[in-house]
Amino acid sequence: MSSLPPCPKCGSEYTYDDGSQYVCPECAQEWPKNAAESVGQARVVRDANGNELHDGDTVTVIKDLKVKGSSSVVKVGTKVKNIRLVEGDHDIDCKIDGIGAMGLKSEFVRKA
């Protein structure tokens, strides 16, 4: 029996130690060894200025952002209301008037 933790993504018991992280051979998930310690801690998302963001906040875009798969652009100064914080490659889920549902990275917004 292994004393290594199971994979947090797929639950596989075949994880292995790879230096400073664990790796799952079944789904290729990698996570740091100290992730087990931080499970009880809430994730903190900060904007470009270092302000902490929360669900329902209003933010302003600080850089022109191209919309993937479209010729549209989210312009600097666009206000986005009622954001929702999520896990994944983008930190923020929101709806932008004229464009629709989007995923934004917190490094490209500031709290309004």
Image: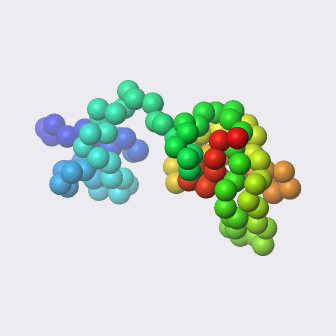
Which coloring applies here? Answer: rainbow
The foreground one among 15 and 72 is: 72
Quarter occupied by the C terminus = top right
Identify which residue is drawn at 77% across, 53% down: 78
Q: Is residue 21 visible?
A: yes
Q: In the rendering, at what x and y percent does residue 76 appear? A: 73, 59
Q: Is residue 26 visible?
A: no
**Quadrant in the picture for residue 108:** bottom right
As drawn, is 16 to the left or to the right of 69? left
Q: In the rendering, at what x and y percent does residue 62 appear? A: 67, 56
Tell me how many marks there are: 0
Q: In the rendering, at what x and y percent does residue 23 appear? A: 27, 53
As drawn, is 33 to the left or to the right of 65? left
As drawn, is 91 to the left or to the right of 38? right
Identify which residue is drawn at 52% across, 43% down: 50
The foreground one among 22 and 105 is: 105
Q: In the rendering, at what x and y percent does residue 110 appear? A: 63, 47
Identify which residue is drawn at 58% across, 37% down: 53
Q: Residue furthest front?
A: 49
Q: Is residue 29 above or below residue 2?
A: below
